Amino acid sequence: MSEQKFTVLPKHVAVIMDGNGRWAKKRGLPRTDGHIEGAKTFRRIGEYAGNIGVRHITFYAFSTENWSRPEAEIKGIMHLFYDYLEEAFDRLDENREKGIRLRFLGDRSRIDRELAGMMDRIEAVTADCSKVNLNIALNYGGQQEILSAVRSIAADVQNGTLLPEDISLQSIENRLFTAGQPPVDLMIRPSGEQRISNFLLWQSAYAEFWYSDVLWPDFTERDFDEALAAFEKRNRRFGGI
Ligand code: IPE
Ligand code: IPE
Ligand code: MG
């Protein structure tokens, strides 16, 4: 079984799904077509990661900075989230059998109400699934996430429920979208860029980074395997020797 392919699996894999626009441009297609293909890759890789035993996987789908894109492109991307969620409800029994817990990381206040409602509902109906935690970062920014944790801590200090000297790393972690989930072990970024672009800043403190020139729509299970194989060989020291 493919599960035996790797002796060490990352507990949490993060994927920056980048390169959709360039993929489309190369083919003379509108950028939205790149996002459509990218959404297919997301389904494939999400499914594959679960099959080989990755317990937590987070996909970066839309950043807080992506609002600066043309409106038509944003609309196209949001439409793809609807499609995905509709499908997730259609295939709920199947997904529940596979034990897939779906969660969205990010600020929902700027998301269309109907879409945000679907996000809330899918999280509720998969909350008891525990084999694979599939997180989708939508309107997500790592700095904004830390800022909102700081505000929540400040409010607790102000109302007297938390003493400044009791603020710990855990106090911050508990207030992140990923509360209760392990830190990122492996960060994958295709498309040739080598930057973190405001993704899971806190959670990636000791993540191993793996880059590839492949554009996200072309990313395959084999590329994912390559990243896992590279991860296996890394010597993680966490500051030790
Ligand atoms: C990633 O692909 C998808 C999102 C950021 C929503 P891009 O759209 O950034 O593709 P490139 O980087 O322009 O090729
Ligand atoms: C990162 O890609 C965000 C997502 C993949 C959702 P971007 O294309 O937005 O990142 P930059 O602008 O190249 O850093
Ligand atoms: Mg990009």
Image (cartoon, grey):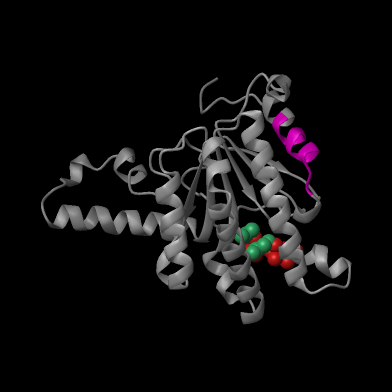
Q: Is residue 6 visible?
A: yes
Q: Is residue 72 above or below residue 198?
A: below
Which quadrant, please, contains the N terminus? top right
Q: Which residue appears at 63% of the width and 65% of the height?
A: 80
Q: Position of residue 12 (x, y in %)?
A: 55, 36
- x, y (%) of residue 212? 77, 46
Can residue 199 be seen at all in this image of the molecule?
A: no
Residue 4's place in the image compared with 135, above or below, is above
Give residue 78's quadrant in the image.
Answer: bottom right
Residue 189 coordinates in the image, percent (x, y) = 69, 48
Residue 54, given in percent of the width and then of the height, sits at 60, 32
> Start and end of the magenta stretch?
219-228
Residue 225 counted in the magenta span: yes
Q: Residue at 81% across / 52% down in the picture?
A: 218
User: In the image, what residue occupies the spot 69% across and 44% down?
Assistant: 45
Q: Is residue 43 magenta?
A: no
